[in-house]
Amino acid sequence: MTGGRFIFCADMSIITISYGAAINHYDIINTASGIVAHRAAIAQKHNKSFLSRREKKERRILSVFDVVRTVLAVRQFRDEPIPEDVVREIVEAGHLTASAGNQQPWHFIVVQDKETLQKLGELAKSGPYIAQAPLAIVVAGEQTPFAVSDASRAIQDQILTAWEHGVGSNWVGFNNLPQVKPVLGIPDNIDVIAIIPFGYPVNKVGKGNKKRKPLGEVVHRERWDQPFA
């Protein structure tokens, strides 16, 4: 059945025929998949991006595996500030992480002051390069059974989110940084789990060139004696 603007097809989809003064030919759009293509054609005509905010988010979700595949530890940072919207997204990634019983036993202290970063670099024996970073997030946790596990998940989410924006990082310390507490005013009943410095890498880093054991050596299918691959 046709009515000038709509065609109802056998597969229950609807084809819309739109025409007007600005278009010299009929644009036929299937509502199930053609709307984006139609928008793309219009946007291309005007040399504009046609991706909506939601579509951009969906495209980002599809790239999660590539972020995991390529992320590497970075210990040398350029003297370049990280944009505030990127900092906020990194922080929010930790805030949104799941936790046992949704207890959220973590606290994140965002440090950008140069003198404080210098001090943290002096106090963390395994992370003197914190002093070079334009940003560090000190991750602390309440003294609960799952605080370390929950905070660790949050840290990884922050590292991956930062990497998506080209910002490198590395994990410094592990639940052994009591000397940091007085510098940042952290209460005695809160543990400092780690410090994560963030910054743009000085050197180009590899794209997924990681030294890992063969998959079949560490992954098993159904039983221990059956390698996954």
Image (cartoon, grey):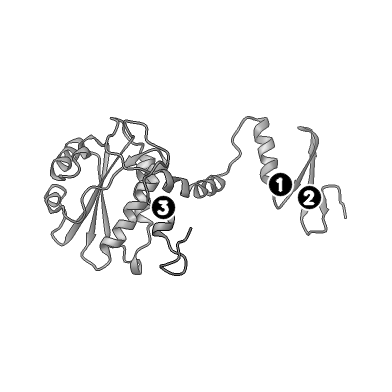
Name the spot of residue 183 as percent of width and height, x first.
Answer: 13, 47
Q: Quick one: label 3, few (<14), some, or many (20+) residues within 10 Å?
A: few
For the residue pair 156 and 216, the one nearer the viewer reads as: 216
Name the spot of residue 191 as percent of width and height, x first.
Answer: 18, 58
Give the quarter of the image for residue 51.
top right
Q: Secondary structure at mark 2?
A: strand
Asked if labels 3 and 2 touch by Cβ distance under 8 angstroms, the answer is no
Asked if labels 1 and 3 touch by Cβ distance under 8 angstroms, the answer is no
Disc number for residue 214: 3
Q: Earlier in the sequence, mark 2 or mark 1?
A: 2
Q: Quick one: label 1, few (<14), some, or many (20+) residues within 10 Å?
A: some
Name the spot of residue 224 as percent of width and height, x first.
Answer: 41, 68
Q: Earlier in the sequence, mark 3 or mark 1?
A: 1
Q: Is residue 219 left or right of residue 34?
A: left
Asked if labels 1 and 2 touch by Cβ distance under 8 angstroms, the answer is yes
Residue type at tag 3: Pro
Q: Residue farthest to the front?
A: 225
What residue sits 38% from the left and 61% below the top?
98
Residue type at tag 1: Gly
For the residue pair 187 and 70, the one nearer the viewer reads as: 70
Q: Is residue 23 left or right of residue 187?
A: right
Q: Quick one: label 2, few (<14), some, or many (20+) residues within 10 Å?
A: some
Q: Secondary structure at mark 1?
A: helix
What residue sits 70% from the left and 53% below the top?
32
Disc number for residue 34: 1
What residue sits 65% from the left and 35% below the top?
43
Mark 2 = which residue?
A: 15
